[in-house]
């Protein structure tokens, strides 16, 4: 008999919500190791460097499709005390599949001198289906953002928004050496931020589980009374 069950909801990139959730079960280090097993990029590519760190972790690992923008803050507005928001940015954001991750490049002469991402913008972004945001600039309002379960990754923390303004969006950007294009799959946790090649994304949980099991064998041996260099060598050799 033909099943009438509704198939799993898929994002525009072909991943189901279940497949995204399966990736979230592993930390960024394990996902990075699993990507290496597919040989799709070099081991020193595809992640942000140590200049980008986690300031608000959210309630679960951050995973979503990149929505890109650039900000700048080198000039004072001609009138008023600050630059206004650009509603077109919010409309553009909704053209990308959820869950979303905002990747914001600070193009200022002094990146991070002021912060574009704080409680207000994080609240807006969360309401618009974003799991978190990444910037090479600064972030602020950290206790409030942490409490709302929104992930924030940045180069520093700052007390003021200064005169930062959104200058454009929807183009490739770069944060911490990681180049990101709209729609790229972005993962982040306490270890940092990396991109996930979409062609292998659905295969990563199985590869990650195999790596975890291999590492567990070594860890269990090192903690057992049966440990010796010989048994360690045998396990490591058998995994190669």
Image (spheres, rainbow, N blue to C red):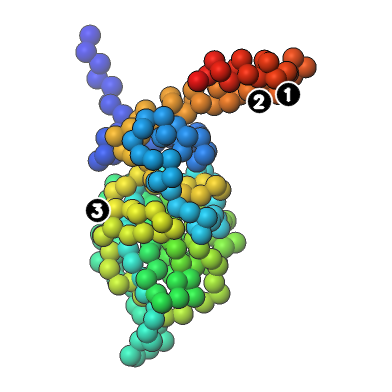
In this rendering, position of residue 143 left or right of residue 169 = right
Can residue 116 be seen at all in this image of the molecule? yes
Q: Which residue is drawn at 55% across and 47% down?
A: 191
Q: Regarding mark 1 in the picture, which secondary structure is present there?
A: loop
What is the CA distance from the residue labelled 3 to the residue labelled 2? 45 Å
In this rendering, position of residue 178 left or right of residue 154 = left
Tell me residue 208's x, y (percent): 47, 28
**Vertical position of residue 195 compared to residue 36: above or below:** below
Image depth: mark 3 or mark 2 in front: 2
Report the quarter where the N terminus lies: top left
Q: Regarding mark 2 in the picture, which secondary structure is present there?
A: helix
Q: How crowded is mark 2: few (under 14 residues within 10 Å), some or many (20 or more)?
A: few
Image depth: mark 3 or mark 1 in front: 1
Q: Viewer-proximal residue, 52 or 128? A: 52
Q: Regarding mark 3 in the picture, which secondary structure is present there?
A: loop
The dot on residue 219 is: 2
Q: Viewer-proximal residue, 149 or 111? A: 111
Tell me residue 118's x, y (percent): 49, 67
Q: Name the residue under label 1.
A: 223
Q: Viewer-proximal residue, 35 or 96? A: 35
Q: Residue at x 39, y 46 (%)?
A: 46
In this rendering, position of residue 38 left or right of residue 33 = left
Q: Are marks 2 and 1 in contact (CB under 8 Å)?
A: yes
Give the mark nearer the N terminus: 3 vs 2: 3
Q: Viewer-proximal residue, 98 or 226? A: 226
The dot on residue 95 is: 3
């Amino acid at each position: 008999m033909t099943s009438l069950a509704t198939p799993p909801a898929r994002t525009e990139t072909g991943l189901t919500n279940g497949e995204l959730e399966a990736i979230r079960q592993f930390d960024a280090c394990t996902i990075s190791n699993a990507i290496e097993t597919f040989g799709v990029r070099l081991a020193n590519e595809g992640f942000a460097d140590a200049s980008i760190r986690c300031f608000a972790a959210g309630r679960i690992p951050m995973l979503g499709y990149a929505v890109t923008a650039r900000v700048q803050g080198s000039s004072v507005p001609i009138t008023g005390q600050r630059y206004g928001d650009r509603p077109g940015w919010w409309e553009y954001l909704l053209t990308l599949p959820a869950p979303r991750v905002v990747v914001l490049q600070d193009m200022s002469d002094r990146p991070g001198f002021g912060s574009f991402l704080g409680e207000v913008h994080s609240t807006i972004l969360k309401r618009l289906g974003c799991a978190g945001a990444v910037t090479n600039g600064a972030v602020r309002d950290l206790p409030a953002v942490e409490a709302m379960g929104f992930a924030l990754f940045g180069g520093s923390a700052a007390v003021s928004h200064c005169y930062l303004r959104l200058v454009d969006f929807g183009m490739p950007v770069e944060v911490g050496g990681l180049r990101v294009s709209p729609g790229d799959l972005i993962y982040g946790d306490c270890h940092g931020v990396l991109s996930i090649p979409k062609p292998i994304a659905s295969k990563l949980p199985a590869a990650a589980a195999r790596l975890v099991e291999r590492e567990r064998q070594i860890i269990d041996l090192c903690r057992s009374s049966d440990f010796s260099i010989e048994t360690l060598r045998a396990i490591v050799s058998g995994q190669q």
